[in-house]
Image (spheres, rainbow, N blue to C red):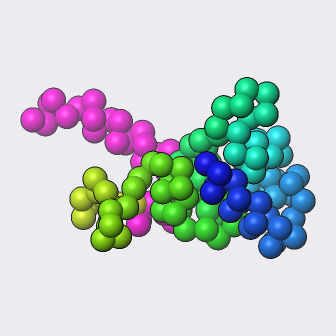
Amino acid sequence: MDSLAKLLKEKRAAMKLSLRSAAELIGISHTYLNKLEKGFDTRTGISNKPTPDTLKLISNTYNINYITLLEICGYIAKQNDGNLKYQSADMKELISIVENFTKPQIRNLILYAKFLEQNKAVAD
């Protein structure tokens, strides 16, 4: 997470935003943004791993590629050839579409995916 912390600090500085104003723009608390910029929770020493939803908010606010943030946080990985590891062509297409979704759209997509997963046995 150190690279995420560094990236977040650099982007906020480049945008000349205070911690509080950046957090407000992103839609998270300033204390949480502070933890993300440190890379760990100072009380527990545990590394922070923001959710994909939080990464999407950061991506939109700081204009950072969402896939890059997912990679940095270990949600996805790239192979030596630059392709996403464990991702089919369909998954790549889905991720590229979802990159531009709003938070409510992402939430609806998750709910729909869960519905499909629960009803998979019926379709099979």
Q: Is residue 98 visible?
A: yes
| Most common SS among magenta residues | helix
Residue 78 x/y as whole percent: 37, 61
Read off the magenta span: 96-124
Residue 60 in the image: above or below residue 86: below
Q: Residue at x 32, y 67 (%)?
A: 80
Quarter holding residue 122: top left
Residue 100 within the segment the image draws in magenta: yes
In the foreground, 4 or 94: 4
43 left or right of 49? right
* Res. 29 visible in picture: no
Q: Is residue 89 above or below residue 31?
A: below
Q: In the rendered view of the protein, which quadrant contains the C terminus?
A: top left
- Numbered label tally: 0
What residue sits 55% from the left and 68% below the top? 65
Measuring 50% from the left and 45% from the top, which residue is drawn there? 107
114 or 11: nearer the viewer: 11
Quadrant in which residue 58 is drawn: bottom right
Q: How far across and how far down the image is residue 116, in percent?
A: 28, 38
Of residues 53 and 78, the one drawn nearer to the viewer in this rendering:
78
Give coordinates of residue 17: x percent, y percent.
Answer: 87, 65
Where residue 10 appears, x then y in whole percent?
76, 66
Outermost residue on the top side: it is 44
Q: Residue at x 48, y 57 (%)?
A: 71
On screen, residue 115 versus residue 20, left or right, reads left
Quarter of image, res 7? bottom right
Question: Is 107 a magenta residue?
Answer: yes
